[in-house]
Amino acid sequence: MNDSLEQQPLIELPAPCRIGLLSDTHRELPQAIFSLFADVHHIIHAGDIGDWDIILALQILAPVTAVYGNCDDYRVRRHCPLQQTLRVNGLMVQVTHFPQEAPALPPAPVQQIQVFGHSHVASIQHIGSTLYINPGSISRPRQDQRPSVALLQVDGEQPPRAAILSLR
């Protein structure tokens, strides 16, 4: 089991691939995660983890890629980078805690995916050739949303698909 994510190189994942996405756990990991992510091939945590034990628990389910967020202290930051990149069946997946500015472009075939957190508001937006995914927050959702995570499916035959899953 990997005890540090800091030095991860570009991670290559083959298709088909099912990826569990979460962010803003802030030291909470509900039991529901273990059934929702039971069949994922990889897990991405987009920061504000709260405690390194969250990552260790997730690694029981699948390999984890994680970045640190603004609320993470040195115990998390010493293991996680500010941003991370994965390649899934040729698609670049950028992971960061803070959302990137999205240009106003009409949807085009998806060529990259941005996974982020910070706002505690779950969303999936297809802008230009980028799919922007915020899985929301397990611990402190905002704007009357429920605690949530997301699932990303990349199978190589169809465009990548993402879905937000409410925990309650």
Image: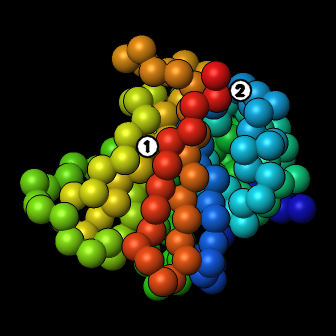
The residue identified by callout 1 is 134
Residue at image coords 47%, 55%: 162
Q: Position of residue 157 (x, y in %)?
A: 48, 83
The residue identified by callout 2 is 27
Residue at image coords 40%, 73%: 159
Question: Callout 2, which amino acid?
Answer: Arg
Residue 131: name its quadrant.
Answer: bottom left
Q: Is residue 33 visible in the rendered structure shown here?
A: yes
Q: Position of residue 38 (x, y in %)?
A: 80, 52
- Of residues 44 and 72, the one nearer the viewer is 44
- Of residues 73 and 29, the one nearer the viewer is 29
Residue at image coords 72%, 25%: 28
Q: Find out whether the residues at labels 2 and 1 contact each other: C-beta distance under 8 Å.
A: no
Residue 43 in the image: above or below residue 16 = above
- The secondary element bearing badge 2 is classed as loop
Q: Position of residue 103 (x, y in %)?
A: 13, 56
The Cα atoms of the two marked residues, 2 and 1, are separated by 18 Å
Residue 84 in the image: above or below residue 101 = below
Residue 99 in the image: above or below residue 29 = below
Q: How is the image coloured?
A: rainbow
Q: Is residue 47 left or right of residue 26?
A: left
Tell which residue pokes out farthest to the front in this image.
Answer: 158
Q: Is residue 144 left or right of residue 14?
A: left
